[in-house]
């Protein structure tokens, strides 16, 4: 895996994540920095997956990682406070979708 492919993967995923954030109304510079860092970590994870561990089956892996990243802390906090869980469904679905799409992008770029 070349550094150029990794950089292209990071850029593609960072742009995807920024598009999701932009659509959600999160338009601060700090958000872009955090999303770029998230894209870096996810790209390194994908490089490990595609480079050594898995050739196929990337979609379930990235959807599961997306579910984990969607905020288990949010869900457990809501349960502990007795808050309704329905409002958490949309952000969880959006994050899981975002990670699934990022996995598809990285599958195309890093393979």
Image (tube, rainbow, N blue to C red):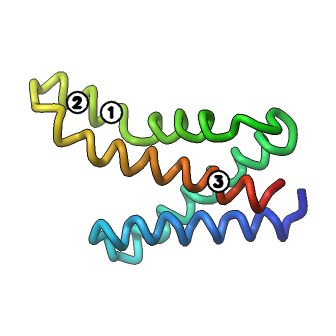
Q: Nearer the viewer, mark 3 or mark 2?
A: 3
Reading the chain from its start, which is encountered first: label 1 or label 3? 1
Compared with 26, 56 (above or below) is above
Tally of numbered discs: 3
For the residues bearing labels 3 and 2, Cβ distance under 8 angstroms: no
Q: Residues within 10 Å of mark 3 (few under 14, many from 20)?
A: some
Task: Identify the residue shown where x is 53% and y is 39%.
Answer: 63
1 or 3: mark nearer the eye:
3
- Mark 3 to mark 2: distance in Å? 31 Å
Q: Marks 1/3: CA distance?
A: 26 Å
Q: Quadrant of the C terminus?
A: bottom right
Tags 2 and 1 touching, CB below 8 Å: yes
Please give the name of the residue rendered at 38% of the width and 66% of the height, measured from the top-left corner: 21
| Residue tagged 2 | 77
Under tag 1, what secondary structure? Answer: helix
At 82% from the left and 65% from the top, the residue drawn is: 5
Q: CA distance from mark 2 to mark 1?
A: 6 Å
- 41 shown above or below 6: above
Per the image, label 3 sits on a secondary structure element best described as helix
Q: Which mark is residue 104?
A: 3
Q: Which mark is residue 73?
A: 1
Left or right of 25: which side holds 5? right
Q: Residue at x 78, y 49 (%)?
A: 47
Q: Name the residue nearer the viewer: 23 or 31.
A: 23
Q: Relative to 84, is 32 on the left or the right? A: right
Residue 95 is labelled as none
Where's the N terminus, which quadrant? bottom right
Q: Where does the image place residue 33, in percent across and percent down from the top left? A: 49, 69
């Amino acid at each position: 895996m070349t550094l150029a492919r990794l950089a292209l993967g990071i850029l593609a995923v960072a742009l995807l994540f920024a598009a999701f954030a932009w659509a959600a109304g999160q338009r601060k510079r700090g958000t872009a920095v955090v999303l770029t860092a998230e894209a870096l970590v996810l790209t390194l994870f994908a490089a490990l997956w595609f480079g050594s561990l898995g050739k196929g089956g990337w979609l379930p892996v990235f959807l599961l990682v997306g579910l984990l990243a969607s905020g288990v802390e949010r869900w457990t906090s809501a349960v502990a406070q007795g808050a309704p869980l329905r409002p958490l469904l949309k952000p969880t679905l959006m994050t899981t979708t975002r990670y699934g799409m990022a996995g598809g992008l990285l599958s195309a770029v890093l393979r």
